[in-house]
Amino acid sequence: MISVQQIEQARRVIEGHAVRTPLVKLDVETDAEIWLKLELLQPVRSFKIRGAGNAVLSASDAQLAGGVLTASAGNMAQGLAWAARLRGVPATIVVPDHAPQTKLDAIKRYGGRVIKVPHDEWWQVMLDHRYEGVDGLFVHPVDDDKVMAGNGTIGLELLEQSEDFDAVVVPWGGGGLFTGIATAVKAARPDVRFYVAEPETGAPVTATLAAGEPVEVDYTPSFVDGSGAKALIPRVWELGSRFVEDAFALPLTEVADAVRTVAERTRVIAEGAGALPVAAALSGRIPGARTIVCIVSGGNIDPAVLARILVGETP
């Protein structure tokens, strides 16, 4: 379990590196006000700089002697490579074979080494916390207390930026973002309801709530590459599930519509995972909410995919 004290310590560690992202109102006609926490404005264009930064910048020289290693579809990879460069150590990233080229290019731009493997093998690295033949400090993209504490700094900022929100929607990839933010916010405002947004192409939280116990689901890669999975990560689900009010498995058409809406109304670009909460809020699925905060987790979307979405297609 992570604590508010760990989150406050993480904030001190990443100060001057991660930016305090704005909370802006989305200009749409809906029953509830929708506000966007724009984590896509971070230096690596996603919230991952917070967790990766806390894990790497707080590590000792001895822990970093062999460099750092993670498994990521792209955003954690960029955050970790960025943080490793600050510490002057090498970063190795194991990526699934469907990872978008724009994210792979960014990993290399930050100095990271990419190892591409099939999705099932990549998922096993996530479960094992290691990759055969590569040494270094393994920083799990989700199941790591320092990563979740870094993510929780978003919650501290939300509490300072608004006293009015009564619902928060967070995309679920592995649950570390959700758990970190909810831990910070619920400690101060237990009345705030937290919701999970997932793509219907891989929605284990939605299926687990329906079944009453953790279940595996079919998973199909999509342009929503930063969210969706075939299964839950047990420890993270144990930590985060106590905060989950409900979960929504969203059709890709609605996610693409949300990407377009954010682009048209705010002139910023959200990736698929970042648009998931917006899709949930726009759909009216959140009952009784007056003010909804959507965590727009990142903006690393392939330009070709974005172009298709902007002309009305669903990739």
Image: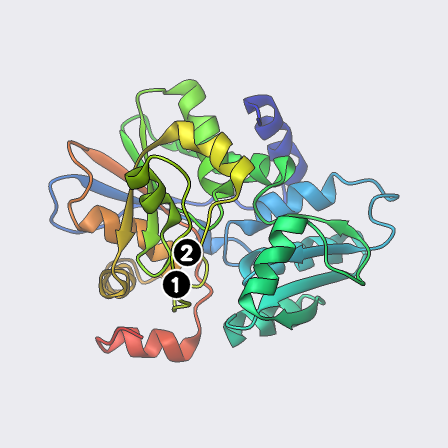
Q: Can you see residue 86?
A: yes
- Assign a secondary structure to mark 1: loop
Q: Are marks 1 and 2 in contact (CB under 8 Å)?
A: yes
State the image coordinates of residue 174 (x, y, percent, origin top left). 49, 47
- Residue 237 lies, with reference to residue 199, above or below; the image says above
- Residue 111 lies, with reference to residue 47, above or below; the image says below
Task: Please name whichever residue, 170 or 31, is drawn nearer the observer in this view of the structure.
Answer: 170
Task: Please name whichever residue, 138 or 6, is drawn nearer the observer in this view of the structure.
Answer: 138
Q: Can you see residue 159?
A: no
Instruction: Give the crowd class for mark 2: few <14, some 14-19, many >=20 residues within 10 Å.
Output: many
Task: Please name whichever residue, 55 or 165, is drawn nearer the observer in this view of the structure.
Answer: 55
Residue that appears at 39% across and 63% down: 224
Instruction: Give the crowd class for mark 1: few <14, some 14-19, many >=20 residues within 10 Å.
Output: many
Real-space CA distance between mark 1 and mark 2, rounded to the nearest whole angstrom: 8 Å
Residue type, mark 1 in image: Val
Q: Which mark is residue 19?
A: none
- Name which quarter of the figure residue 162 lies in: top left
Compared across the picture, whether 106 is left or right of 283 comes to right
Residue that appears at 41% across and 56% down: 228
- Residue 15 lies, with reference to residue 243, above or below; the image says below
Q: Which mark is residue 224?
A: 1
Residue type, mark 2 in image: Gly
State the image coordinates of residue 72 (x, y, percent, origin top left). 58, 59
Q: Residue under circle 2?
A: 228
State the image coordinates of residue 209 (x, y, percent, origin top left). 32, 38
Compared across the picture, whether 90 is left or right of 202 comes to right
- Assign a secondary structure to mark 2: loop
State the image coordinates of residue 177 (x, y, percent, origin top left). 48, 42
Nearer the observer, disc 1 or disc 2? 2
- Name which quarter of the figure residue 314 lies in: bottom left
